[in-house]
Amino acid sequence: MFRAALALVALLPALAVAAPERGAVMDLLNLHDAVATQADLKALGEGVDVALMAIADDAEVPSSRRGRAITALRFFPSEAVRSFLEAKLAPETKAILRRKAVYALAGGWNTAALPTLNEALADDDVQVRIAAANALAQLDAAAVTEALKARLAVETVESVKLALTKAVGE
């Protein structure tokens, strides 16, 4: 909870910047056959990260679009965004959004996100654990293999064990 409050405080200066219209950001998140690229999002100007975080937090927005907003945050690797994504891993957050946060952290912060991704390996939701294993498998670090093997030793769900084994490369 403290991290979430800290992230909001860190965002206050960014709110003073003229953010793109929410509608323009939503249009990119509404794409069905294509995914909004980093270039698409950056072309909207300053404040896209703030708009994406607001969309991700808006319970009135469908979870699929909120998830796309979270995924797109990987293109904005700041401490404020990282804190926001880490806060999205809280148990009270919908599992689909936690999964998207796992992938965004891996994509935007690579091995710097290793401790957080390692924690996600123990999430209560099976799909989040599988996402964490798959995300960690994309990173290049010896510590990743250690984390995956440690979780494999205690994992009880067969589908997660399979994802962990695949991620380790065995």
Image: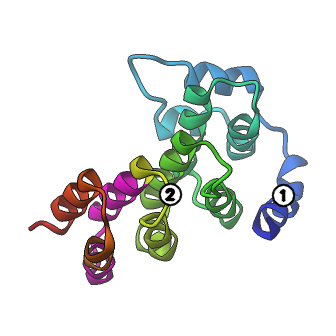
Q: In the depicted view, which residue is nearer to us: 165 or 67?
A: 165
Asked if 138 appears above or below 93 in the picture, the reply is: below
Percent across and percent down for residue 82 are: 62, 62
Q: Is residue 79 left or right of residue 138?
A: right
Asked if 121 appears above or below 144 in the picture, the reply is: above
Mark 2 surroundings: few (<14), some (14-19) or many (≥20) residues within 10 A: few
Percent across and percent down for residue 49 are: 68, 46
**Dot 2 corresponds to which residue?**
124
Q: How is the image coloured?
A: rainbow
Tell me the kind of residue under disc 2: Asp
Magenta-colored span: 129-148
Residue 72 in view? no
* Residue at x 40% of width, y 57% of height: 129
Q: Quadrant of residue 169?
A: bottom left
Q: Is residue 93 left or right of residue 29?
A: right
Q: Which mark is residue 129?
A: none
Tell me the kind of residue under disc 1: Leu
In the orientation shown, which residue stands out farthest toward the front? 156
Main SS of the magenta part reads helix
Percent across and percent down for residue 119 are: 49, 71
Q: Is residue 75 left or right of residue 141?
A: right
Considering the numbered disc 2 on the image, is that residue within a helix, a strand or a loop?
A: loop
> Per the image, is 40 magenta?
no
Residue 29 in view? yes
* Residue at x 52% of width, y 70% of height: 116
The C terminus is located in which quarter? bottom left
In the orientation shown, which residue stands out farthest toward the left? 170
Precedes in sequence: disc 2 or disc 1: 1
As measured in the structure, the alpha-carbon distance from the residue carrying label 2 to the one carrying label 1 is 26 Å
Q: Quadrant of residue 87?
A: bottom right
Mark 1 surroundings: few (<14), some (14-19) or many (≥20) residues within 10 A: some
**Dot 1 corresponds to which residue?**
8
